[in-house]
Amino acid sequence: MPRCLRAPGRHRRAAARRPLRRGDRHRSGCAQSSSRRIRSSSSARPGWHSINYRHPDAGFVCAIFPAAERVQLVFEHGVRLPDPEGRLSGTGRQVRSLDFPAGSDVDAAVVAEFLDLAVELGIGLRAR
C-alpha cells in the first residue's frame, strides 16, 4: 500500500494536496510505469467547469469538460496533434477535443494515445 494511503495524520493530508511526482505512487496504489502518461505524473485541479491536467515537464496538457449531453477531453495544443483518422473536433486556431456523447463507450487506447502525444508535444514546446 502506498505511504500516502497508510500513513496517518499530517502526511496523508499533505500527500493529497501536492501533485504527483515522478517516482510517487497513485493514491489508488498503482505503481507508475511511464513518465509520459498523464495519469502517472500529473496534477489535477478544478478549473473553469473542468478538471485540468498539468504535467511537470509538459505544463498544461488537457482538461475534461463534463456536461449532461457529452464529455469533452480538450487538448490545449490540439491543432498540432497528428489526427489522421479525424477523431479530434474543433475549428479554432489552437484547441481540439475528443468528444464522448453521454452513454457512449470510451476507447481507452485512443485516449491514451492522444494523451501521450499531447505530453510529448508539450515537453517539446517547453524545451524551445
Image (cartoon, rainbow, N blue to C red):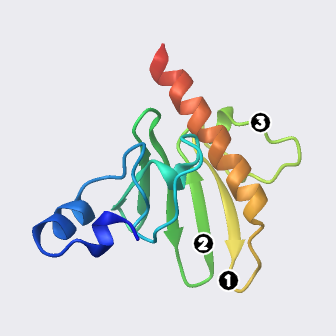
Q: CA–CA distance between discs 3 and 2?
A: 21 Å
Near mark 3 (Cα within 10 A), the count class, few <14, some 14-19 or many ≥20, is few
Give the residue type at disc 3.
Pro
Give the quadrant of residue 99.
bottom right
**Residue 46 image offset from top left, x and y in percent:** 33, 64
Residue at (45, 23) in percent of width and height: 126
Q: Report which residue position mark 1 lands on.
A: 102
Q: Is residue 36 above or below residue 74?
A: above
Give the residue type at disc 1.
Ala
**Residue 121 image offset from top left, x and y in percent:** 60, 30
Q: Report which residue position mark 3 lands on.
A: 82
The residue lying toward the viewer, choosing from 116 and 95, is 116
Count of numbered circles on the image:
3
Q: Helix, strand, or loop for circle 3?
A: loop
**Looking at the figure, which quarter contains the N terminus?**
bottom left
Residue 29 placement, left or right of 15: right
Q: CA–CA distance between discs 3 and 1?
A: 26 Å
Q: Are marks 2 and 1 in contact (CB under 8 Å)?
A: yes
User: Which label sits on residue 71?
Assistant: 2
